[in-house]
Image (spheres, grey):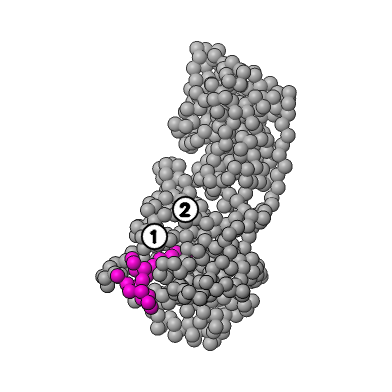
Amino acid sequence: MLSTVYSAGLFGIDGFPVTVEVDARPNLPSFELVGLPDMAVKEAKERVRTACENSGLRFPETSLMINLAPADRRKEGSGFDLAILTGILHAVGVIRHTVPLEDSCFIGELSLSGRLRGVRGVLCMRAAAREAGFQNVYVPTENAAEAAAVRGIRVYAVESMTALLDHLNGRKPLTPLSTGETVSDDELYVGLDFADVRGQAMAKRALEIAAAGGHNVLLIGPPGTGKSMLAKRLPSILPPLTFEEALTTTKIHSVAGLLPDGHALVTRRPFRSPHHTMSAVSLVGGGANPAPGEISLAHNGVLFLDELPEFPKQVTDALRQPLEDFKVTITRASGRVTFPSAFMLVAAMNPCRCGYFGHPTRKCTCRSGDVARYLANVSGPMLDRMDIQIELPSLSFDEISAADPHAESSATIRARVTAARAFARARMAAENDQPRCNAQLSPAEVHRYCRATDGAIALLKQAYDALGLSARGHDRILRVARTVADLDASEHIREEHIAQAIQMRSLDRKYWH
């Protein structure tokens, strides 16, 4: 007998429907699995056989031929176990088809006991099932909250193969989960508040501007000035994730297997802080079946590179294209995958290896050549992509020990940032443009939205000539000035807005000449 059930596969962060065809014939017992499966899929034969027997069923002693279609697309992972066993049991008559199978999608890994284990990428595969027209999707209980994050398809949480059989045969029907399109912002950044940072008013202002416009930031200063402390608190002043942002972020984390158990959606903006010993593949992503790297895991959030010059140059240079395109494309023999990577880059570094080059009170122990070589680890094109460059001075004893009664909390700063982004969205909506951060404006959009007064244009011209800016540097100053104007709720960029943007982009001339 021929039986057809359905499952879903994964490529990148996109799911695709998979037809599981099972042909059972009364010949000598055999078990063949075709359809370009990888090793994990091939091993399903043993898992399925043992899970069936440990669920109180006798595995059919027949000739079984199983095809995973489309046969020319590679199938990876253990998520096909549930569909394979369901198809086998339906083919031999154990499942009596009380519940329709043709409009259902089965996803999950079987343990040897017959219980279901969670798999990666359920949200992506569930979205593919909905787009393919399926009405029901059966997933492990571990993945149920994730699968039920959005509406459009009935989601059933399955604990074991026995429970699924009871449901399909009408003995003990399962209840579909309630679904909803909500993003909770109840998760607070406990212990991460800007009010805890002593002094560094200029750096706080710079990060507020960066958060309002999605700009990249370079923090330079001696050890102990609060560079890492400020960077870790940046997500606490970013606006809440929209539903679409949360959905895309959740897909990426689901594919990477980083979604916490029981969480339907990622509700906090990601903060990724990889170690400087990482490889370029870890940063960008890759593998036989390409997996997202750190820049994609930071999508809609912050990528923090501490001790920037310590990163291999090939790693930091790999950031250059994603910082311009806000996506990364990985090509392999099996196909091409594009991962979104619209993130804020925050980099921190010391001015030299010992950390005290240019310090007013402590002597630098580095030789002049060592300082030049250390700074040369950060390339000019990389510096050119840092919209905001801020130097953090050492703090005095009074600044460290005295509490500041006027220190603003993250909630206060976040309210201003959210208002500035809303002001920018309203401007783009008036011209029917897709809302985006100021840092993501194209050159054409820079000329359209960055309208400046005559005095502001004259000041920008002086800076362009004096600092020897590139065309990219010119546009990035305009983007930052546009964000400063948004924080002031000003439709036009004025001189003070340009001046503040220039002031925050001059350290490359001080240290890199």
- In space, the residues marked 1 and 2 are separated at their CA atoms by 12 Å
What amino acid type should be assigned to the residue bearing mark 2? Answer: Glu
Q: Is residue 323 visible?
A: yes
Q: Which residues lie in the magenta part?
A: 346-365
Mark nearer the N terminus (1 vs 2): 2
Q: Is 181 drawn above or below residue 36 in the view shown?
A: below
Where residue 176 appears, as percent x and y from the top left, is 72, 37
From this view, report whether residue 209 is shown above or below residue 466: above
Q: Which residue is nearer to you in this view: 274 or 89?
A: 274
Q: Which residue is mark 1?
A: 316
> Residue at 62% of width from left, 49% of height from top?
265
Q: Would residue 360 be found to the left or right of residue 81 on screen?
A: left
Residue 502, magenta (yes or no)? no
| Left or right placement of residue 165 versus residue 458 in this view | right
Q: For the stretch drawn in magenta, what is the main secondary structure?
A: loop
SS class of the residue under badge 1? Answer: helix
Q: Is residue 438 visible?
A: no
* Quadrant occupied by the N terminus: top right
The residue where tag 2 is placed is 294
* x and y, in percent, of residue 409 in the image: 61, 68
